[in-house]
Amino acid sequence: MPRPVRRFAATLAIALATTLAAPTSSPAAAPVVAAQREGNPVTPGDLTGYGFDQCLAPTQRSMNKWMKHSPFLAVGIYISGKSRACRSQPNLTPEWVSTQLAKGWRLLPITLGPQASCQPRFPRYSDDVKIDPTPGADKTYAIARAQGYAEAGTTVTDAQALGIVPGSTLWYDLEGFALGNTHCRESALRFLDGWTVRLHELGYVSGVYSSVGSGIKMLDDARVLRPGTFTLPDRIWLARWDGIANTSSSYIREDGWRPGGRMKQYQGGHNETWGGVTINIDRNYLELGQGSVATPETHCGGVRVDFRSYGRLTAESSGRRMEALKCLLKEQGYPVGRWTKASRGSLPPAVQSWQTAHGFAATTTWQRQHWIALLSQGARPVQKVGSAGEGVFRLQRALNAAGSRLKITGVFDASTEAAVRAWQQQAGLPATGVIAPRSWKQLQTGGR
């Protein structure tokens, strides 16, 4: 490969840093306003779950199939940086970004720019430079810091052009390098210092991806051994292919960037096929922000509707489950009025109206299949590990009516996934652990 362009003079670096530090209304401000007007959310937001990354942004068909069939909710996309292998991104457009966000994907925008000076695999191209290892007279590695500062500005411009709004996390990919090389390590630290400072100035969250034995250990050592010396990233992305879906590693201390500041690439490049679509990916596990959380729900002014089990009811039944039934019917437009025991021992007409409207025979009892259908009624969004909110509440209640005994939290966790797989197998569906429209349809017809 061609050798990198000779490093900037120190005076040029100082001038560059001064220019970049000047206040900006930023030519990228207009795209930000447009993105906010379109309603793009901050990404990735709060999430505990699985993600994948691949150099080339997948086609829309692939993304649709993987949303419905794969365990992943997050996807890494290379949006910036002259060192990235996938400079050409035919699928990566503002429309692609807004479509994925609207469908529930969490995006992990990645920059692969200048790499550590002792990294042997770079530069890739003739216009691709490495991080300058020159310490300078004051040993502050000012040139490297200016490079990081400038790279962050370029990344924000690229992110805003795609509709990735402020508050989102932008990730710098620093490939593994020889940690014992002092000038290589210290210049990389200063580069990332400049990267983080500039992202903060522009309203973005700073993330850094690197090998846990080099770049991540470097950052963790700086955090503990030289506190306050560097502006450290808000979040770290560990590359440690140990096959364990967590965010820990013996290479770094357990307390740093917790809670909510870690993700781990725990499996390297391999093919996976979901919904008939094969992509070569890396696998990741995320624990970011507050994690997947759900706002508690209130029904009918405080009527309890969450139970570990939902039993058979008759006109003579009473108690909390009967109150829950009345409440849920009312919410779906079938108010039962004052509940009185009919002389013929049947449920009120509104109950039987709901049954016939949803494809059931009108009966004198309320049974398991009625509960499953009633509790799952509503929209049919894809739900998987990491999902949280109203759809998960409905799902967990319906699963409990079908025989699971979940704690109803509104968060799709490992126990919910196991219950989904068990129900899908029992219902004759592919046991993917993902609730897509086909599974919703079966739940909303009482599991039939």
Image (cartoon, rainbow, N blue to C red):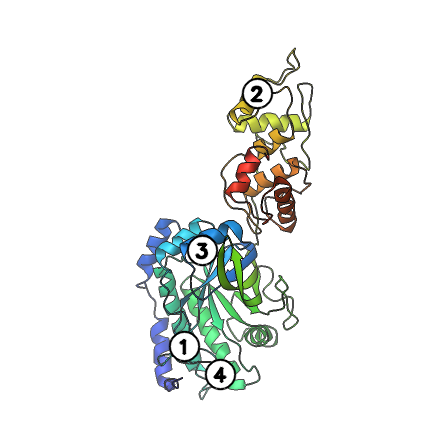
Do residues under tags 3 and 2 come within 8 Å of each other at their CB atoms?
no
Q: Taking the image as drawn, is residue 386 in sight?
A: yes
Write down the residue under mark 1: 147
Write down the residue under mark 4: 120
Find the distance from the CA under tag 3 to the CA under tag 2: 43 Å
What element does badge 3 sit on?
helix
Do residues under tags 1 and 4 come within 8 Å of each other at their CB atoms?
no
Estimate the x, y position of residue 389 in percent, counting from the top left. Answer: 54, 44
Q: Taking the image as drawn, is residue 41 in sight?
A: no
Find the distance from the CA under tag 3 to the CA under tag 4: 34 Å
**Disc 3 residue crowd, few under 14, some 14–19, many 20+, Cα 10 Å:** some
Of 244 and 369, nearer the camera is 369
Write down the residue under mark 3: 62
Write down the residue under mark 2: 352
Q: Earlier in the sequence, mark 1 or mark 4?
A: 4
Of 235 and 284, nearer the camera is 284
> Mark 4 belongs to which amino acid?
Pro
Taking 382 as reference, is 158 left or right?
Answer: left
> Mark 1 belongs to which amino acid?
Gln
Q: Nearer the viewer, mark 1 or mark 3?
A: 3
Residue 228 to residue 381: above or below: below
> Mark 2 belongs to which amino acid?
Gln
